[in-house]
Image: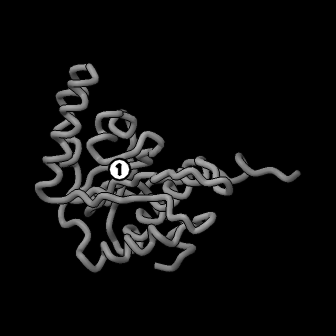
Amino acid sequence: MDALTLLQTRQSDPRLIAPGPTAEQLEIIKRAAIKVPDHGCIAPWRFIVVEGDARNKLGDIYHQAAVAENQDDRTIERAKELPLRSPMMIIAIADVTENPKVPRIEQVQSAGCAVLAMQQAAFAQGLGGIWRTGYFAQSPAVKAALGCKEQDEIVGYLYLGTPEIDIKKPIRHKPETFFENL
């Protein structure tokens, strides 16, 4: 797939099944993540690949956090199932460090760019993916369980696999709605 087609057709696929990325596909996804804009070359990111039985371990972390943080019944009930929505997930963490030339927001944005780059690399290889956040990206208990420092951010959970349904989504927005000349 050429780059312009990728940029104009990439979509999120919420219903993902096996197979997930092969080792070779995952290596390309990883390489895409670390080629994003990185002011100061400080590599302000960290990634955790979750697949196989590790998905259940992450579900347990979610469940324990939801109970400890007094979340609603629905959140607690769904916690263990969420990581099972795809054969693989990559947790993207902005590994923020104090830097006089690179503000925190740029470090978080760089990690966000990495999520998009990984999703695009997956899509270009015929895989599907969806970038999710929500409560479990903000939970102090989940962050602690994943080894995050206080200033770190979980910028996303990138679910990867094969789209269960091949539905091409329509273009929702028109460029002229969001661009103007000065």
The quadrant in which residue 159 appears is: bottom left
Q: Nearer the viewer, residue 2 or 88?
A: 88
Q: Position of residue 9 (x, y in %)?
A: 49, 64
Residue tagged 1: 157
Residue at (31% x, 40% y) in the render: 144
Q: Position of residue 123 (x, y in %)?
A: 39, 67
Q: Residue at x 34, y 41 (%)?
A: 143
Q: Position of residue 137 (x, y in %)?
A: 37, 40
Mark 1 closeness class: few <14, some 14–19, many ≥20 residues within 10 Å: many
Residue 73 visible (yes or no): yes
| Front position in the image: 20 or 141 | 141
Return the residue found at the far left: 53
Query: Residue 7 sits in which quadrant?
Result: bottom right
User: Relative to 149, is 74 above or below?
Assistant: above
In the displayed structure, would residue 54 be above or below residue 70?
Answer: below
Q: Residue at x 17, y 51 (%)?
A: 55
Say above or below: 164 vs 72: below
Left or right, 165 with respect to 178, comes to left
Q: Secondary structure at mark 1?
A: strand
Colour mode of the rendering: one colour
Q: Is residue 155 left or right of residue 82?
A: right
Of residue 153 and residue 167, the one placed in the foreground of this image is: 153
Instruction: Identify the residue shown where x is 41% and y is 73%.
Output: 124
Q: Identify the amino acid type marked 1.
A: Tyr
The image position of residue 50, as x and y in percent, is: 23, 57
| Quadrant in the picture for the N terminus | bottom left
Residue 164 showing in the rendered view: no
Residue 8 is drawn in which quadrant?
bottom right
